[in-house]
Amino acid sequence: MEPFERRYASALADPNIATGLLAFQRSWRDSRDAQVSDIERSCGRSFESLRDELAAVKERVRLQWDASIEEFSVRAREAGSVVVQVTTPKEACDYIAQLCRARGVKVVVKGKSMVSEEIGLNAHLESVGIAAVETDLGEWLLQLAGEHPSHLVMPAIHKRAAQIAELLTRVLGRRFAADDIDAMVKSVRTELREQFLTAGLGLSGANALVMESGTVLLVCNEGNNRMSVGIPPVHVVTAGAEKLVPTFADAMTQVRLLARSATGQPITTYTNFVTGPRPGQEQHILLIDNGRTAMAADPDIASALGCIRCGACANVCPPYAVVGGHGFGHVYTGAIGLVNTPFHHGIDAAAGPQSLCVSCGACAKVCPVDIPLPTQILEVRRKVAEERGLPPLRRLALRAFTSRRLVAGATRVAAALTLPLRRGGFTRLPGLSRQTSWRSLPAVPIRPARQRAEVRKPQAQPVLPDPPLAGRRVLLFLQCLSDRLAPDIVVATTRLLRAAGAEVVVPRRQHCCGLPAYDSGDWRSARAMAEQTIATLQSADDVVTPAPSCVVTMVGEYERLFRDDRDAQWPRRAARLAPRVHDLVSYLSGPARLATGVLDNGDREPVTVHRFCQSGNVLGHTDQMETLLRDLCGVPVRPLEENGVCCGFGGSTSLTAPEVAAGILDRKLTCVDDTRAATLVTDNPGCVLHLRGGADAGGRRLRVLHVAEYLAEHLPA
Amino acid sequence: MAMQTQLLNRFRERADEAGSTVHIIPDSAGLRGTVELVAPDGRVALAPRFAASRPRIVASLGPRAVVITGENPVATAAGCPVGMMAGELAVAETGSVLVVEDELSDRVVSMLCQTLIQVVPGSKLVATLDDTAAWLSARGGGAGRAGYAALITGPSRTADIERSLTIGVQGASRVHVVIVEAE
């Protein structure tokens, strides 16, 4: 496989990839959502209940790993299979090559098997003079093109029809029209028919291994799998033991979830239950470890073994849509690929791909086995940072960032130095075009929010009638980004909370919740800032912040930073802080709920709303912002297509893979263009700066406001 | 009776969504007519288990009938545009037919014939995949017993190229399910 940097660059250079994958993701999403809504009508169970059940089944098997393998092996052997456990890819490849030699096999036909990709089987067989022929249409096409699959389920999805027509024309020597997909598909039937009939060995993977009967579950739409396993005199199965499920009933739970998540179908055309060899055939089942035992032993990663290889995580992933599986993955692609690659192929193979994850949380929402992929990817990122080290400049910057004073000083210097370059609210830096051609950098204000009079001192300002926060004290958590680069957001937040009747207190020593360091894999620096933040916010009062990204960190991730502590002090303090922390939108929708129309000043200029990805995927927000805008201000809100999909800021990804961030940003701004709204409202300061910068760089006349800024604009004078 | 009609309707709806055509006939006398309707000419490959249990349809098909045996099953079935076989269960939840095809000679009909006709007794209509699992468990669970069963749901298909759906890849491109009510 080519090095990551080369794969990344090639993907970006091929315009077909991004266009094709965006269309694919959108079309898949519609079918998948329709199927998931339909599950309950179809079988009386909800997606969530099936998912929880399958996750529990998989966990039970993991906890009895050896016993489960034993039970399956006994049954499969009773049915006439040879069952072998191997540890390394080499052992697996050697076994299969030796079997081929012993049986005089010259051609192997393959149904789809990701494990066979994982162990590099095709290359090994070719090296000993045995032809391995892929029979799945997508895999066959890629084999002709000399490429590896870019997706778990749809291996050639990164290719357009025209490219495939050109490939087939070249390889088969007859003309294929660019839009005649039917003819291209039919060619696989004629070209492969002979191979199925003459191959000495058929190889498959396993979607599940049913313990109660020693049965291999194989799902397939084309029909190639049943031919590969049924016709040749030898059938070999390459699978990981994580595919074990106790019963047929468990297998059906998986069947109900798999096709719906993979292809947006209720079920595949063929759902095969293969038990033992057919009469006249021999069957060998290879259970390959290759790091799976290590995964099972890692408490943070073990649940990733529940993966049923549906590909849904790739199908909702914004970075995946920009670069495809060859960039966003290794052998295994998509979010799950970022998690299991360190174990199957080493930490170095995972380092590049994992850097593309923006932590938006979309993958976890659709995973049919409830794997906490976003957190697991951050664990991988931490390992990469610890084992390979962060780039020295970054390491230094993150370490320096733990000091509030240093950051304050550096910001003052940056503000002074860039003052001559400020224009229109942005810093116009010549050069640095890889970072700035697609997103203008914000101006660095001379005075941060914490030094603004409106924030520091209680201002005489009108309090709204029936103020919901009368008599309440609220601690304001500024967020480092808003404080230093977008103080207007903080000012607006303060004004709103005071208008609602609160006494707003701004703890002086507050700095950063630790997210930037956490997101970069530097958990030591993140922990230092977490301790500092917890100490600063110690009180009985509610903490409100305009940054839901900080809420996600404080409420969801702090316990992870302290999990190795033997002393319970910090975990306890973090647990006491968590329920007190609120993002502004939640607060205004709950404790600080204002009266309908109280911010209605007659402004009816339509707006549209982008919801910070984690607000939806992690905090569970739905349409709270739209409701606030409509109820409080009476303003028309135009629906935004893909309103909860990431804007592409993604913290460190913005810096290390700006092309990916730019691609995701473009997707978002194109949806915004379609609403024809002149104002975009969002709930996260990171999104605000990213979208504002993107709109400016693209020459769009679009006002981008934090919801606090929008609402505060509508406060009575 | 009402339950049966409900199940039948649900089966037909789901099978239809999957691209199969469902025929409901009162008894096996209607089989010949169904074949006439679906495939008026061409050789009809008959899966061995099906042929053994339905000698009348074999006879009525006359020279069109090709009973698959252990002799060159692949080549024989490949040469027949139509195939006929038995289904063990018809599953209403998904519109699928569960087939048992232990031998290669049993499998080739559903593997290779472009038009596939599956005949299922009405009494073998079940509601869910859970019922199917119970059937499979009873048949082979707890004692490793070699065998091959499959749920077939509509014609073969792929969307590997730009997610554009094409029907008919390696397996059948037309699937007809015949439910025989009286059986």
Image (cartoon, rainbow, N blue to C red):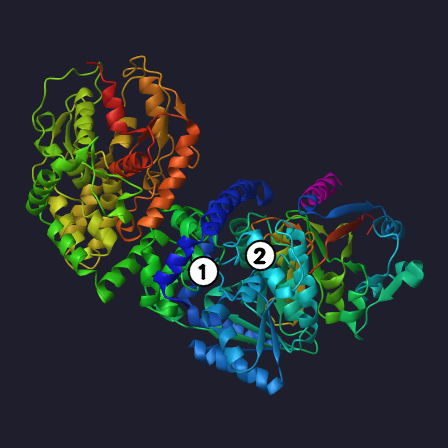
Residue A497 against residue A38 in the figure, above or below: above
Quadrant (top left/top right/bottom left/bottom right) for the N terminus of chain A: bottom left
Tell me: residue A300, above or below residue A640. Answer: below
Where does the magenta region start and end?
A: B1-14
Label 2: how many residues lie within 10 Å, few (<14), some (14-19) or many (20+)? many
- Which residue is rendered at x = 79% and y = 50% of the image? B178
Residue located at (36% from left, 68% from top): A343
Relative to B151, A310 lies left or right: left
Residue named by callout 2 = A164
The lab-note entry on whether marks 1 and 2 share a chain reads yes
Report if residue A395 lies within the magenta region: no
Q: Most prominent secondary structure in the magenta stretch?
A: helix
Q: Residue B6 lies in magenta, yes or no?
A: yes
Report the Cα–Cα distance between label 1 and label 2.
Answer: 38 Å
Q: Which residue is mark 1?
A: A58
- Chain designation of label 1: A
Q: Is residue A632 above or below residue A673?
A: above
Q: Tell me: residue A482, above or below residue A599.
A: below
A374 lies left or right of A178? left
Can you tell which quarter of the image residue B98 is in?
Answer: bottom right
Q: Looking at the image, can residue A591 be seen?
A: no
The residue under label 2 is which amino acid type? Ile
Return the x and y of residue B124 as percentages of the image width and height: 74, 53
Closer-to-camera residue (A307/A516): A516
Q: How many marks?
A: 2
Residue A70, x across and y down, in percent: 49, 74
Sequence-first tag of 1 and 2: 1
Percent x, y of residue A76: 57, 74
* Percent of width and height locating residue A604: 35, 16
